Amino acid sequence: MFAHWKDLLRTSYQRGAALNRASPKLVAGFQALSAGQNGHGALDAKSKELIALAVAVTTRCDSCIAVHAQAARRAGVTEPELADALGTAIALKAGAAYGYALRTLEAYEQFAEPA
């Protein structure tokens, strides 16, 4: 087992409460950002949670995974739907590495040129 996700989620909420006590303006700003992303209703809850989980994978955010895995279950996301979203995240992350490899080759080549 990688982590006990229910404990991780509980701990994230507890630490979030501590951060809120220490820096309420910061937390209020984060909460406003989160509330503001709810869009105009063009995407259903399942789609939003699938996107959130794919992004959480590419950004390696364990607390995001815990929050959105729970929300995905509640939204009715199926395992095949989740697998498709995770496959997209995996492909995209590999694609990002490929894209940055091309940029690195270009940078390397440019440094061979006189300044």
Image: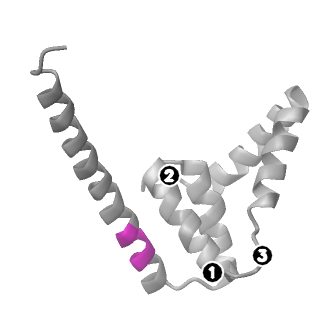
Q: Which of marks 2 and 1 is nearer the N terminus?
A: 2
How far apart are labels 1 and 3 at the CA level? 15 Å
Q: In which quarter of the image is residue 18?
A: top right
Q: In this rendering, would 88 be left or right of 62?
A: left
SS type, badge 3: loop
Q: In this rendering, would 110 be left or right of 80?
A: left
Magenta segment: 83-88
| Residue shown at 63% from the left, 73% from the top | 48
| Residue picked out by circle 2 | 3
Q: Earlier in the sequence, mark 3 or mark 2?
A: 2
| Residue picked out by circle 3 | 40
Counting from the top left corner in percent of width and height, residue 26 is at: 82, 34
Q: Nearer the viewer, residue 19 or 49?
A: 49
Q: Does the magenta stretch include residue 87?
A: yes
The residue at the far top in this view is 115
Q: Please determine whether, in this image, residue 70 is positioned above or below residue 12.
A: below
| Residue picked out by circle 1 | 46
Counting from the top left corner in percent of width and height, residue 85 is at: 44, 74
Q: In this rendering, would 96 be left or right of 57?
A: left
